[in-house]
Amino acid sequence: MSSVVVDRRLRRARGAVFAAFSLNGVLLAMWVVHIPAITGRTGVSTSALSLLVLLMAGAALVGMRLAGPAADRFGSRTLVMLAAAAISVTVLGPGLATDPITLAIALACFGIGNGALDVSMNAQAVQVERAYRRPIMAAFHAMFSAGGFAGSLLGAAAQHAGWSPQVTLTCASVCGLLVTAVLVPHLVDHQRAESPSHAEHYDKADAAVSTRLGAERTRKVFLLGSIAFVLLLAEGVAADWSALQVRERLGTSEAAAALAFGAFSATMTLGRFLADRVSGAFGPVAVVRYGSLLAAAGFALVIGSPWLPLTLLGWALCGLGLAGGVPQIFSTAGNLGGTTAATDMSRVFTIGYLGLLAGPAMIGWLAAVVPLTAALLIPLVLTLGCAVAAPVVRR
């Protein structure tokens, strides 16, 4: 087989993974932009909605934990196909819900599919990145952000046109299934790593080495998950509290306060497109170390700034600094070796995702007793810790 054919196949595989990440972002955004209409029709209160969102997050964790071992056994390509089809179908569920119970069931199913797709598409991305022999993981995560932005625009346009959530989500479901059918044939085939238990001349010495390596891998997974926890905690804090922080600290209008999240999300998307080049030139440790320092500097600027432009610069630095770290962590987790790459990644995902959930809640609790701006000292200190722990992502 010629190298030209191999290169073409790799480019198609890369494009297919781009499509999977984008699809995930689009479908999640479709649910988010229809929350007001769906909760209004189903009679769900704000407090009840928070519980339903927590239910969806818990279901996503279940999907992540199930997808890891399944991807190791059947291949990430198969799991991407099943999970992408599942999330495409279940995105229709919230639009068809008629009361809080049916909405809860719909969100639980949607969450499981989302969690499974998150792990399986990242496992597939690691395989494609390994074949490319250069960093490309951050660009996949950038496409997720771009998909979310595109989905929010499409959802807003459908609402402006007077489409009901049922119609819009049905269209999204059909399009998702079509995209899934197109992308799956171009994904990388599953390549099962050899397990030492099936190798020839496997004796007690090999068993001891295997046990030691397994313990080291478990420790590495925990450390990678801990860094992912902190970085996603900081990301969740910035996403959920940046606008309110500007409003509370500077007394600006709601429109001006919204610029804080815009600055953060714009630089995060840009940073993810640039992070692969930085990683290729300086290595993943540098991306995590200096990105964490940049994020810490951004939080420090936000805490101390009395002016809107300076505060917006701080949130922009947070987005740029946090952009590349998590993709490096996931890529490292997927390259630890052995036969449990996807399982290792799912464990890192689960720990990190808990940070995304815990961060906004923690800041909310602190903001009840101290000013919101002062509560941002928590992510500032934690991101400095990530800079110290950056060597964990060395491969």
Image (cartoon, helix red, strand yellow):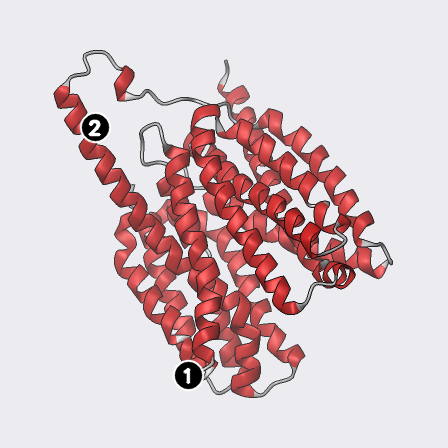
Residue 304 tag number:
1
> Can you say whether 147 is above or below 375 in the image?
above
Residue 178 placement (x, y as % from top left):
72, 33
Q: Is residue 326 left or right of residue 44?
A: left
Label 2's element?
A: helix
Q: Residue at x 19, y 16 (%)?
A: 202
Q: Which corner quadrant holds the C terminus?
A: top left
Q: Which residue is mark 2?
A: 210
Label 2 crowd bin: few (<14), some (14–19), many (20+), radius 10 Å = some
Q: Is residue 280 left or right of residue 189?
A: left
In 3D space, how far apart are the residues under numbered discs 1 and 2 (Cα atoms)?
Answer: 51 Å
> Which amino acid lies under the numbered mark 1 shown in the image of this protein?
Gly
Label 1 crowd bin: few (<14), some (14–19), many (20+), radius 10 Å = few
- Name the N-terminal-most of marks 1 and 2: 2
Label 1's element?
A: helix
Residue positioned most to the front: 101
> Can you say whether 234 is above or below 57 in the image?
below
Q: Residue at x 72, y 61 (%)?
A: 39
Q: In which image quadrant can residue 117 be found?
A: top right
Q: Would residue 133 be visible to someone looking at this image?
A: no
Residue 6 placement (x, y as % from top left):
51, 22
- Front label number (1 vs 2): 2
Q: Residue at x 54, y 34 (%)?
A: 14
Q: Is residue 329 left or right of residue 38?
A: left
Residue 282 placement (x, y as % from top left):
33, 49
Q: Is residue 349 left or right of residue 204?
A: right
> Which amino acid lies under the numbered mark 2 shown in the image of this protein?
Ser
